[in-house]
Image: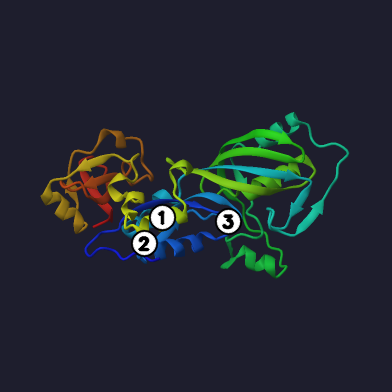
Amino acid sequence: MALRRPAGLTMDGLLLVHKPEGPTSHDVVARVRRIVGFSRVGHFGTLDPFASGLLLVGVGKATRLFPFLGTAEKSYEGRIRLGVATDTYDRTGAVTAETSPPSWPAIEAVRQAMNRFVGAFLQSPPPFSAKKFRGRRLYDYARRGTEVAPSPCPVKVRAFVLKSYSPPDIEFEVNCSSGTYVRSLAHDLGEALGCGAHLASLVRTAVGTYRLADARSLEDLAALAEDRRWPEALLPLAELLPHLPKLVLSARDADRVKNGRLVTASVPAETAGEADGPSSGAGPVRLFAPDGRLVALARPLPDGTTLAPFLVLV
């Protein structure tokens, strides 16, 4: 059942959705659109169809926060199966190599190999991925049997932890930067161990400060929509990006910001040292109207007293 929104109700915020195995992230977004009765819906950070877990879904103006929510670090739990390599680097692909070694790698050898993938390094994306090479998706080349050599991308893995080992299966946890392919980690680990491997299962447990434990299933959201209680699941704009400093403006300055104009204000001290570019001044600040609405994100200029809005949300 699609929700009929009450007249005049604003739907701007974030839904924490527990994506099941099977549907694509786009499928989940389409389902959410039908549930909430609102077309301006998008997700932050794709999950492969065979994977499950936390999918951040923005509604309304929250979809404009992709540069912040879409690039947050991710955490996963999963299982890697040794001895079998596939063309997709996961369980859905065709087997490209299979080995039956007389003995599997010792647990300490597995830990040492996993530790080699902790830190910052360049990672090659899987052949079957949406990364672009010369204007086309890599999976387009792979489906045609055309081999290409895209440039590896910088990634950062903060932790790659062995939870349990029952050969040929490795249960693991990983915390990594946005853009890291866990499928590639599994494939490359198999290469490092000399027996091949693929990603057998994957669950995303966190995106930035958001946790899977707080997510709702599509069925839960649909039930809330039936009872017109969907706002219970929506995190409003004012609660998003809590790691960014908050500044409450006067009504006059809030009106100026709505028109993209500069304002003079006392810049929160916690922005110091958060510069995201040599000429951008300190890090972003959330600007609020006196009534508590998030009106914009702004960057302090080098003078330390002028705020330049770069994302207006009203």
Closer-to-camera residue (288/136): 288
Q: Write down the quadrant of residue 141 in the picture.
A: bottom right
Mark 3 or mark 2, which is nearer to you? 2
Left or right placement of residue 235 versus residue 30 in this view: left
Marks 1 and 3, how far apart at CA? 21 Å
Q: Quadrant of the C terminus?
A: bottom left
Provide residue 237's location: percent of width, then percent of height: 30, 50
Q: Could you tell which of marks 3 and 2 lies nearer the N-terminus?
A: 2
Q: Amino acid at mark 3?
A: Asp
Residue located at (59% from left, 58% from top):
22
**Image vertical order of residue 37 relative to residue 52, above or below:** below
Residue located at (61% from left, 59% from top):
129
**Image vertical order of residue 144 relative to residue 217, above or below:** below
Q: Write down the quadrant of residue 285 in the picture.
A: top left
Residue located at (77% from left, 57% from top):
95
Q: Could you tell which of marks 1 and 3 lies nearer the N-terminus?
A: 3
Callout 2: few (<14), some (14-19), or many (20+) C-alpha neighbours within 10 Å? many
The residue carrying mark 1 is 221
Element type where label 1 sits in the image: helix
Tell whether label 2 touches label 3 (CB within 8 Å).
no
Tell whether label 1 touches label 2 (CB within 8 Å).
yes
Callout 1: few (<14), some (14-19), or many (20+) C-alpha neighbours within 10 Å? many
Provide residue 112's location: percent of width, then percent of height: 70, 32
Left or right placement of residue 61 versus residue 266 in this view: right
